[in-house]
Image: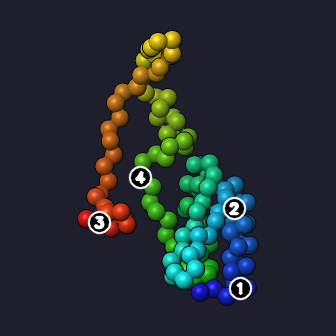
Amino acid sequence: QMDQEEREHLDEVLEAFSTKFDVRTELNLVEGWPQASIVIRGHPDEVLKSLEEIGKVFERFKMPFRSSKCRGPIAGSASARADEVNQEVETVEVEGMTVNSLEKRERRRGPKVDRYGRPT
């Protein structure tokens, strides 16, 4: 549990972090629970950059924190858009609508987990 002064300092540091990376940050705390999470919102490229640094912010407050590892391109990021441009696109007209036909995408399958994220 953080005292009021330390929490205010953390909020100031998170505000500076948000400004530096042009993202929005929120500390998600549930009263009475020892866990906390941080929500980072913004352009996917900026969010990825900020994920590399967020752990350093919490190290100052003696709160161990690691960001989740991202696998593959994040939808909307510049790299994901570049991959889409490189695919062969076939344009088809269906009932007056123009549709871009792309190759079938392989479904990503991650490890099987229960609804709490624990391996099954």
Q: What residue is rendered at 25% in x and 65% in y?
A: 120
Q: What residue is rendered at 47% in x and 32% in y?
A: 84
Amino acid found under the numbered disc labelled 4: Arg
Proximity of marks 1 and 3: CB atoms separated by less than 8 Å: no
Q: CA distance from mark 1 to mark 2?
A: 21 Å
Q: CA distance from mark 1 to mark 3?
A: 37 Å
Residue 1 picture location, percent across and down: 59, 86
Q: Nearer the viewer, residue 79 or 33?
A: 33
Q: Quadrant of residue 92?
A: top left
Taking 101 as reference, is 12 left or right? right
As displayed, is residue 24 above or below residue 9?
A: above
Q: CA distance from mark 2 to mark 4?
A: 24 Å
Q: Nearer the viewer, residue 27 or 69?
A: 27
As displayed, is residue 19 above or below residue 74?
A: below
Amino acid found under the numbered disc labelled 2: Ser
Q: Which residue is mark 3?
A: 119
Q: Which residue is mark 1?
A: 4
Q: Which residue is mark 4?
A: 71
Q: CA distance from mark 4 to mark 3?
A: 17 Å
The first of marks 4 and 3 along the sequence is 4
As displayed, is residue 2 above or below residue 52?
A: below
Q: Which residue is mark 2?
A: 18
Residue 34 picture location, percent across and down: 51, 82
Proximity of marks 3 and 2: CB atoms separated by less than 8 Å: no
Please name which of the two marks, 4 or 3, marks the residue nearer to the observer: 3
